[in-house]
Image (cartoon, rainbow, N blue to C red):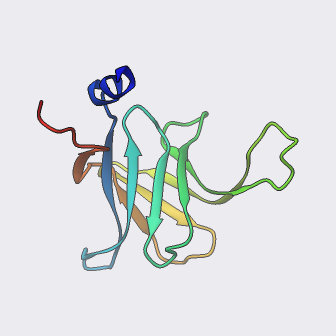
Amino acid sequence: MKHIKEFLTKEFPMFYEFKIFVADTDGNRKPVGVGILKEGQDMYHLKIWSFLQEKFFLIPSRKDAKKFFIMTREPLKNQSERRKFNWNIVGNGTATDQDLIELNFDLFEKKIFLNIIPVTFTPTATLPAA
């Protein structure tokens, strides 16, 4: 019974949701995905709706706070190594002065933006009232 009480009293982290969109020349924004950031972390999980099976990660550069790497990961087949994943760089990002991160994927011509002001705040679990 002690384990259940510990679980129910545990604080759950917050997840922040960010819009990913493309902007046309008129300034209209078309949503194309969502970014998720777990409270206390600096790595965004990106979901582009055109690529539902693929997960992208936006990781800040250690050298410049305004630069980011867009990466994917694949599990290593050889489990004897200490690493679990092979990380691949598939683009980069740059923070702008307008609360946006401009995402530049290697294969896309359009500019894609991540709004760094969160849309929603959602906890991972809802606890029943005691």
> In which quadrant is the N terminus drawn?
top left
Answer left or right for 26 relative to 73: left
Report the front residue among 128 and 125.
Answer: 128
Compared to residue 73, the image places residue 63 above or below, namely above
Q: Position of residue 2 (x, y in %)?
A: 36, 20
The quadrant holding residue 129 is top left
Question: Please, which residue is most extreme toward the top here?
Answer: 2
Q: Position of residue 80 (x, y in %)?
A: 88, 42
Report the front residue among 57 and 98.
Answer: 57
Q: Position of residue 75 (x, y in %)?
A: 73, 55
Tell me which residue sits at (22%, 43%) in the image. 126
Tell me which residue sits at (28%, 43%) in the image. 125
Compared to residue 41, the image places residue 36 above or below, namely below
Report the front residue among 28 and 72.
Answer: 72
The quadrant holding residue 12 is top left
Q: How many marks?
A: 0
Question: Please, which residue is most extreme toward the front here?
Answer: 1
> In which quadrant is the C terminus drawn?
top left
Answer left or right for 92 relative to 20: right
Question: Please, which residue is most extreme toward the left here?
Answer: 129
Answer left or right for 78 relative to 71: right
Tell me which residue sits at (32%, 55%) in the image. 18
Answer left or right for 105 relative to 12: right
Tell me which residue sits at (58%, 40%) in the image. 61
Report the front residue among 81 and 116.
Answer: 81
Compared to residue 81, the image places residue 89 above or below, namely below
Q: Position of residue 106 (x, y in %)?
A: 63, 69
